[in-house]
Every structure is written in structure tokens, then in C-alpha cells.
């Protein structure tokens, strides 16, 4: 039987949401717009176990669009490039298999292996082996940011990295502001993210300082908020306008803000920060956690949570200057992250030789990495034993 042939094949679990889903969707649409044929291979990962984990509607809708072919498990596939999306999907095993022969095979690393506390969440070496066994191809790892590349260098030379990051891209036409910031009597500070406590500061005082109104004439609006967890931690949400995650189109939500302020838990590593770039494209000034400086550099302002109220007031004090600066930042972001650049980036990826050299900063030394791998293996064994104990006889 002949193999199914496609220019691009995407292998993914459709239950991912947030930045991972948005990034994959933007890539898929850019591939299709460039005239490529796209095969879709949805998989069922052991990473998702809860009843609340349901398919992302926007990702699921790809299957019904012209130019996208859904592949059945077990299919023999010949592809120019195959993209495996998100390492955690494959580290925890997938139910489906396929025989994939690809000129170029990459695993897009949307998530870092090391957690904020230094422990490991997944093992890149084992993940590569799992993909090889299930799909017949050993992918290069394509980090979405310099942060992820720094983490993955800790596992060289036992994995292979692409020479260039596979950064998130955006359809410029979709992200267009309909109003200028600070054009109303009440200024709005806010943010959006998944409803995950790790996406928020650990201390109630830091949560309030980072996004609460800094004084009269200000209000707070957020989309995606772990309400119960924040309340339990002592955060007063009584005056906030809280929109459920994906309760509004993201561009419309961002258009309602005057400042985007984003801070996260000490236990979290922000792999990329797609939501931040969306705010920049909507010409919103961004006040960010200092740990995001490595990703966004001069495109944002950085502070501790306690410094945020004064920064908000300073931004509002010079609205014309703030608007002008936000317009300049949008042009920079468009130049770096536009979907129009995807065909050229795809061509570069096809000829990317990959690297296993350890040059550049690493997250952990070889000794520390081995110790963390041993700790991860112990946790996995303990979790397996607990699972066996609760299985019905």
C-alpha cells in the first residue's frame, strides 16, 4: 500500500489550549496560505487525564477545512516536514502510532523541561525515544524561545536542536487595535492567561500590586482567572471584571485594556509569552515580570510587583508618548513574528542541519541534570505504584 503524501504533517493532541494551540493554529494557517498540503494526525496523550480536558474547538475545526487531511492512526505517511507539537504530549505516551517518513522531523518545544523550582517535568532524551518508537522518526528539537533553548542545551549531545528557534507567529491582519490607550475617563489594567495559579504570583500582595487599580480612575479587567485559588490565598477580587478564559475573542479583550500587566509564580517558567506579543500587536504597553526580559528585551517595561502602580501612573501621565512607543513596538513585533515570514522560515528549516554542540548558556550542568533525571525517574515510579494501588480488582 502506498504512503499518504503531504508537504506538512502536524502531530498533536487537540486538548492543548492557550499559547500552544494558538501557535500551532497560526503555523497551520500560514502553511495552507502558502499553498502547502497539510496532514493532521491527532493523538491521545497520557498527559491529559481529567474530565475537564476537552478538545480545543479551534484546533478541532482544522479537520473540517479545505486543504487539511485528517490521517488515521497507523497510516504510512511520507512528508516534507513533520511537526510534533509539545513535548509533554509525547513524554507521557500516546495511544496512536504511524509510520512516518519525513525529510525533516522536528518536535516543537513549547514547554521547558525544568520547572521554576529546578525539578524536571519531562526528559527530552526519553521523549525522543518514545516518538521514534511510535512514529519511526527521531525529531530534532525546535525551541520556541531562547529560554527553552537554554534548558534543552543541558541535554546535549543526547538530543539534537535546530539551529534556529521556531518562534510563534501571528496573522498581522487579525491584530489591529480599534482604539487608542488612555482615551477614556477610566483606565483599565489587565491580563489574560489560562486559569492556572502558576500563571499568577504566589503572594496575594504581589497579585494585587501587579494588576489591581493603582488609584482613582483605574479599574481591573482579566480574562482567565483561578478565582477560587486566588480568593483562598487572600486576594480581593470584588472589584475586578473577570471574564472566563476564552470568554471573548482575545483581540477584543485586549482592546478593552489600557495596560497589559503580566507576572507569574516562582514555580513557573514562561516558555515564550504569546499573550504578551498579542498585547504588543494590539499596541498595549506591557509591564512584565523581570524574568521575561530575556525573551522580550526592550519591547516592554520590567518591574517587581510593588513597582507596578507607579509604572502604570507614569504610562498614563504621558498618553501621547505611550501611544507613540506602542506603535513603534508593534512594527518591531510584526517584523519578527509575522506569519508572512513562515514560508521562508520553513525553507530554512528544511535545510537546518541541527546541532548537538553545547555552546551557549545552559540551564544546568551535566551533573545537576543527571541528578534531576534521577529525581524525575523516582517520581514517575512512585506515581506508577500509586496508580496500580487504586486500580479496581
Image (cartoon, rainbow, N blue to C red):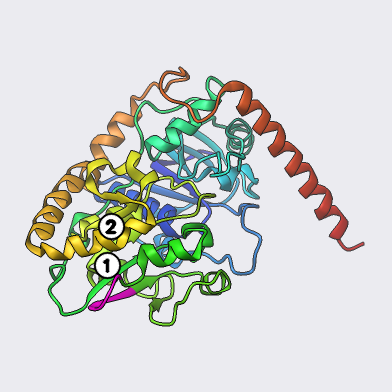
Asked if the magenta segment contains residue 375, the reply would be no
Q: Disc 1, disc 2: CB below 8 Å?
A: yes
Coordinates of residue 127 in the picture (x, y in percent): 60, 36
Relative placement, left or right, of 285 versus 384 is: left
SS of the residue at dot 2? helix
Relative placement, left or right, of 200 versus 260 is: right
> Is residue 211 among what the camera can see?
yes
From this viewpoint, which residue is outermost toward the bottom? 238
Q: Quadrant of the N terminus?
A: top right
SS of the residue at dot 1? helix
Say whether disc 1 or disc 2 marks the residue closer to the N-terminus.
Answer: 1
Q: Residue at x 61, y 28 (%)?
A: 369
Q: CA distance from mark 1 to mark 2?
A: 8 Å
Magenta residues, start to end: 214-220
Residue 223 vs residue 93, the one in the foreground: 223
Residue 62, placed above or below residue 185: above
Residue 391, placed above or below residue 242: above
Q: Residue at x 36, y 25 (%)?
A: 352
Residue 117, placed above or below residue 19: above
Coordinates of residue 260 in the picture (x, y in percent): 29, 62
Residue 58 vs residue 325, the one in the foreground: 325
- Crowd band around label 1 with a 10 angstrom C-alpha radius: few (<14), some (14–19), many (20+): many
Q: Quadrant of the C terminus?
A: bottom right
Relative placement, left or right, of 208 versus 55 is: left
Coordinates of residue 32 in the picture (x, y in percent): 29, 50
Residue pointed to by mark 1: 254
> Is residue 338 among what the camera can see?
no
- Crowd band around label 2 with a 10 angstrom C-alpha radius: few (<14), some (14–19), many (20+): some
Quadrant of the rendered image containing residue 48: bottom right
Q: Which mark is residue 11?
A: none
Q: Which mark is residue 278?
A: 2
Coordinates of residue 115 in the picture (x, y in percent): 56, 43
Amino acid at each position: 500500500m502506498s504512503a499518504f503524501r503531504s508537504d506538512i504533517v502536524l502531530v498533536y493532541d487537540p486538548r492543548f489550549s492557550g499559547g500552544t494551540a494558538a501557535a500551532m493554529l497560526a503555523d497551520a494557517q500560514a502553511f495552507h496560505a502558502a499553498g502547502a498540503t497539510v496532514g493532521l494526525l491527532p493523538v491521545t496523550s497520557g498527559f491529559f487525564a481529567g474530565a475537564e480536558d476537552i478538545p480545543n474547538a479551534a484546533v478541532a475545526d482544522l479537520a473540517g477545512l479545505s486543504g487539511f487531511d485528517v490521517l488515521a492512526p497507523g497510516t504510512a505517511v511520507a512528508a516534507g516536514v513533520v511537526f510534533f507539537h509539545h513535548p509533554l504530549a509525547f513524554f507521557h505516551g500516546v495511544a496512536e502510532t504511524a509510520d512516518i517518513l519525513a525529510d525533516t522531523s522536528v518536535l516543537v518545544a513549547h514547554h521547558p523541561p525544568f520547572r521554576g523550582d529546578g525539578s524536571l517535568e519531562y526528559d527530552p532524551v526519553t521523549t525522543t525515544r518514545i516518538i521514534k518508537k511510535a512514529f519511526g522518526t527521531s525529531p530534532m528539537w525546535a525551541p520556541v524561545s531562547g529560554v527553552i533553548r537554554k534548558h534543552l542545551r543541558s541535554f546535549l549531545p543526547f538530543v539534537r536542536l535546530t539551529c534556529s528557534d521556531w518562534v510563534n507567529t501571528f496573522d498581522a491582519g487579525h491584530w489591529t487595535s480599534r482604539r487608542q490607550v488612555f482615551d477614556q475617563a477610566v483606565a483599565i489594567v489587565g491580563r489574560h492567561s489560562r486559569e492556572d495559579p502558576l500563571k499568577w504570583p504566589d503572594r496575594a500582595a504581589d497579585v494585587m500590586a501587579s494588576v489591581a487599580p493603582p488609584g482613582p480612575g483605574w479599574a481591573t479587567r482579566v480574562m482567565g482567572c483561578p478565582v477560587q485559588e486566588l480568593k483562598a490565598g487572600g486576594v480581593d477580587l470584588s472589584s475586578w471584571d473577570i471574564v472566563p478564559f476564552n470568554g471573548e475573542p482575545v483581540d477584543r479583550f485586549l482592546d478593552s485594556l489600557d495596560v497589559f500587566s503580566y507576572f507569574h509564580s516562582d514555580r513557573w517558567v514562561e516558555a515564550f509569552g504569546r499573550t504578551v506579543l498579542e498585547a504588543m500587536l494590539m499596541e498595549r504597553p506591557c509591564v512584565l515580570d523581570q524574568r521575561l526580559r530575556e525573551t522580550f528585551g526592550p519591547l516592554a517595561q520590567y518591574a517587581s510587583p510593588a513597582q507596578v502602580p507607579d509604572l502604570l501612573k507614569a504610562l498614563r501621565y504621558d498618553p501621547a508618548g505611550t501611544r507613540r512607543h506602542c506603535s513603534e513596538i508593534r512594527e518591531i513585533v510584526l517584523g519578527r513574528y509575522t506569519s508572512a515570514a513562515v514560508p521562508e522560515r520553513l525553507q530554512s528549516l528544511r535545510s537546518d542541519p541541527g546541532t548537538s554542540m553545547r555552546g551557549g548558556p545552559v540551564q544546568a550542568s551535566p551533573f545537576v541534570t543527571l541528578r534531576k533525571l534521577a529525581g524525575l525517574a523516582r517520581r514517575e515510579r512512585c506515581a506508577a505504584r500509586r496508580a496500580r494501588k487504586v486500580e479496581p480488582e
